[in-house]
Image (cartoon, rainbow, N blue to C red):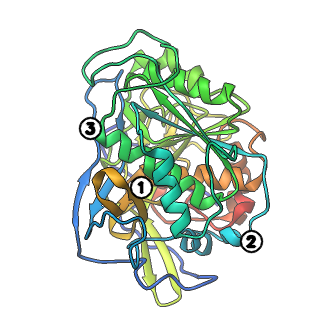
Amino acid sequence: MLTPPVEKTSGSSSGSSAGSSNATQTLAAPLGPRSIVPGKGMTFAACAPSRDPMRAACLATVRMMNSTTSAFPDSADGLTPSDLASIYGYAAPSNQNSTSQVIGIVVAYDNPAAESDLAAYRSYFNLPACTTANGCFEKLGASQTTSADVRRSPFSVSANPTTTISGWAAEADADIETASAVCSNCQIILSEAATDNLSDLANAVSAAVSAGATVINASFGAPESSSQGSLESAFEPAPVKVVAAAGDSSGDVLFPSSATNVISVTGTTLNVSGSSVSQSLWSNSGGGCSAVFAAASFQPGWCSNRSVADIAAIADPNTGLAFYDSAIGGWEIVGGTSISAPIVAGMFALSGDTSYGSGAQRLYAHHRQYLQVNGAGNLDGLGTPKSLSAF
């Protein structure tokens, strides 16, 4: 049974402390020999945190390992698609059925190598090709050529971006590779906003929905503010589900993750002991109680307003995912709640039903059976998924 913790305000802490342990589970298959690589590499945030409530930052954290310019090194460090399937209890990529689900990945600015980097990733892990030519991959973009410091007017049009911001390009690679690692047969739409302005990003959400996306991944956030209220509906395009990263700074509450019917995903650390794993709250995970947006009717009374987050998945870069980014030298490890979000978005898509209920309603209906409580109170929401039945 869910036990509401003491309410916290934005910027404070509540619930159990970071690192709270939970029950272990036995893996369906062992992790690869280089899936967890402790104490190695330099870690950095792909994007600087945003201080502007109308401009978002990407939330990927990259661990630079021994980079190679080859798309086919002897081994890529970090968790693999098969590892994720084993940890979260769904069919391995080689056993997944075809699906009509379409994952929309929304980012700011352009990644000109997104399709070729995805091809390198999928080829290395023996996933089927996902290209523009075979209809699996589609790229949409913003028409204006801008710099990071130039504001766009609300709802700028989308098509053919030319501005590349390296942190956001790494974010795009991490998102599309992670989502396709989970749902290997899902179509991917990469929708690139003109700028990191929330209005442009909301427009990119609309563009992805118009192009057929059934679930949207939003691995970005801006400091929560009442000024964002007019944008809430744009990030809640029912019946399409929007899955957003809760943030990588403990105690922070970010938008769009805090919107009432956006599915907010915070981060965990993977604890491995032989064939057993557990997950605990990642020490950098964002979340708390919204000061702006109301709680959904199905959310427990953890806060007087909306509680952030709804669900948790792997984010700690020390137990992060392998990803390929040609611009930074090849194979690296990526973490952050930017990765938690596409894991959950991929599982929503893989479940085959993204239209049920509002926001995270289905998760709350199924939490007692299909989600593992991590003992971190409202900071990790319902806990971590144990199978697709949670979705």
Q: Nearer the viewer, residue 302 or 116?
A: 116
Please tell me which residue is depicted at 41% across the width and 77% down the height of the picture.
Answer: 75
Question: What is the CA distance from the residue labelled 3 to the residue labelled 2?
Answer: 39 Å
Q: Callout 1: helix, strand or loop?
A: loop
- The percent coordinates of residue 332 (x first, y second) are 34, 63
Please tell me which residue is depicted at 47% across the width and 25% down the height of the picture.
Answer: 201
Mark before the other along the chain sequence, 3 or 2: 3
Tell me the quadrant of the picture where the N terminus can be found.
Answer: bottom right
**Residue designated by label 2:** 95
Q: Nearer the viewer, mark 1 or mark 3?
A: 3
**Residue designated by label 3:** 49
Q: Nearer the viewer, residue 163 or 214?
A: 163
Q: Amino acid at mark 1?
A: Gly
As drawn, the label of residue 23 is none
Q: Is residue 391 visible?
A: no
Q: Residue furthest left?
A: 42
- The percent coordinates of residue 277 (x first, y second) are 50, 79
